[in-house]
Image (cartoon, grey):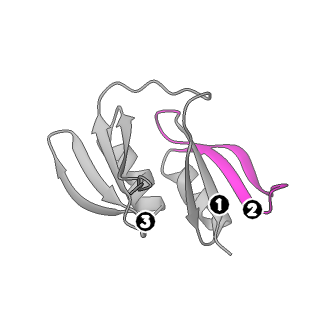
Amino acid sequence: MTSVPVLHRLVLSATSLPAALDLYAGVLGLAVERTADGFAWLRTADGVELMVHERPAVASDAAVAVTFALPELDAAIGRWVAAGGTVVDAPAAQPWGERMAVVRDADGHIVCLVEQP
């Protein structure tokens, strides 16, 4: 029997764990399950784990970009910037039918935010 893998965990390197938590938990609302010794384990509403590891981070525009779907995209963008993130592409309708913004976290990682219908 063939099974399809499920997404179990995303690991994000962050130079400052508190700054990363401000964005991913404070702005996006991911649930913080626990923290310990330079790590934080967060969970999305659908159960995917985001593990934030405090260590040197090297951002790349050509690497993997994480996408989060959330309500009230414009309000989330305002909170994202207030918490130390930056906007690369402001919220806009995309040709594939989503309303999306592209942002950077405090370490420069690209994150896509998609408005839930």
Q: Earlier in the sequence, mark 2 or mark 1?
A: 2
SS category of the residue bearing label 2:
loop
Dot 3 or dot 2, earlier in sequence: 3
Does 49 sit left or right of 23 as displayed?
left
Residue 91's disc is none
> Distance from label 3 to label 1 (Cα)?
14 Å
Question: Pointer 2: what residue?
Answer: 98
Task: Mark 1: give few (<14), some (14-19) or many (20+) Cα within 10 Å.
Answer: many
Mark 2 is on which residue type? Glu
On whether residue 19 falls in the magenta region, the answer is no
Residue in the picture at 19% in, 51% down: 35
Residue 66, position as x, y percentages in the image: 53, 47
Q: Residue furthest right?
A: 95
Distance in Å between CA atoms under marks 3 and 2 = 21 Å
Cβ atoms under marks 3 and 1 closer than 8 Å: no
Q: Which residue is mark 1?
A: 114
Residue indicated by mark 3: 29
